[in-house]
Amino acid sequence: MAVLATVRYILPMKRVIIVHGWASHPNDGWFPWIKNELETRGYTVEIPAMPHPMIPTVDAWVNALADTAGQIDENTIFIGHSIGCQTILRYLETVQTKICGAIFVAGFFRVEGLRSEMERRHALPWMEPLDMEKIRSIIPQSFAIFSDNDRFVSLEENSRMFEEQLGSKIIIEHEKKHFAGKQGINQLQSVLDAVLEISST
C-alpha cells in the first residue's frame, strides 16, 4: 500500500521596514505598537534610526534606508511617516526589484505650515520631482493614509497625487493631525489593516 507523504508548504516571511519622520525616532508614537502587532503575526520588522533627524537630508536618509534594506524582494513591505514616505519613494527610485507594497502615512509631495525659514530650506530638496512611473513599477500596491486636519499636508493635493501617480488606495482619518506621537497618536489600526491586506494578495 502506498504511503502518501505529507507536504508542508512554508510561506515566505514578510519583512516590514518602517521609516520614521522628521524630528522623530524608532520608539516614537505608533511605531512600537505596529512593530509589536506585526511581530506577533510572524512578520520581521525593522525601524532604523535615521541620521540627524532634526536636519534630514535626502542623501543621508536614502543611503541609511538602503543600508538597512539590503536585499529587498516581493516579500518586503515599507511603511513611512511624513518625510519617511519621501525617503522610501526616493530609495525605490534607485532600485530595480519589485516589492510587496508600501503604506504612506501623512506622505507628501508638497508640504506647508512650516514655521521657520530654516525648516523651509531643509524641506525644499524633498520636494524635487520624482520618477513616479519608475517607482510605480516597483510598488504593485500601496496605501496612502491622511488626516483631515493635518496642517502640514494638504489633503486634497497630496491624496490626489498618491492616487493618480502611484495608484494608492486612499484612507482619510478624522482629526489625527500629523499622526505624531506628541499629538497622542500611539496606535494606528489603519496601518495594520493595510499591511494585512497587502500581505494577503
Image (spheres, rainbow, N blue to C red):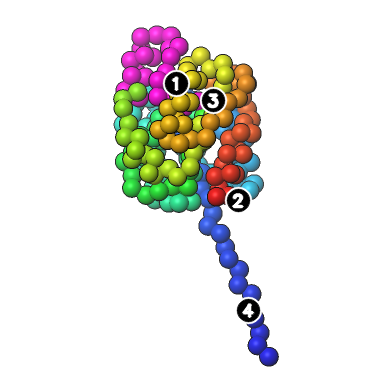
Instruction: Measure how far apart labels 4 and 1 are at the Cα level.
Output: 57 Å
**Residue at (40%, 24%) from the top-left corner?**
109
Residue under pointer 2: 42
Taking the image as shown, residue 113 lies to the left or right of residue 135, namely right
Which comes before the other along the chain, label 2 or label 3?
A: 2
- Disc 4 or 2, which lies upstream in sequence? 4
Q: According to the image, label 3 marks what residue?
A: 146
Magenta extent: 106-126
Viewer-proximal residue, 192 or 118?
Answer: 192
- Asked whether the residues under the numbered discs 1 and 2 touch, taking CB atoms below 8 Å apart as contact, a structural biologist would say no
Indicate which disc, 1 or 2, sits on the residue closer to the N terminus.
Answer: 2
Q: Amino acid at mark 2?
A: Gly
User: Residue most toward the front?
Assistant: 164
| Mark 3 vs mark 1: in front | 1
- Sort mark 2 into few (<14), some (14-19) or many (20+) by Cα contacts within 10 Å: few
Q: Secondary structure at mark 1?
A: helix
Name the residue tied to disc 4: 5
Mark 4 Cα-neighbour bin, 10 Å: few <14, some 14–19, many ≥20: few
Q: Quadrant of the N terminus?
A: bottom right
Check whether the beta carbons of the residues at disc 4 and disc 2 lie within 8 A of each other. no
Residue 21's x, y, as percent? 47, 27
For discs 1 and 2, the disc positioned in front in the rendered view: 1
Which residue is more in the foreground, 28 or 97? Answer: 97
Residue wearing tag 1: 157
Q: Earlier in the sequence, mark 3 or mark 1?
A: 3
What amino acid is at disc 1? Glu
Is 108 placed above or below 19 here?
above
Q: CA distance from mark 3 to mark 1?
A: 11 Å
Name above or below for residue 97 compared with residue 65: below
Mark 3, residues whose alpha carbon is within 10 Å: few (<14), some, or many (≥20)? many
Q: Position of residue 32 (x, y in %)?
A: 59, 35
Q: In the rendered structure, which amino acid carries the disc numbered 3?
A: Phe
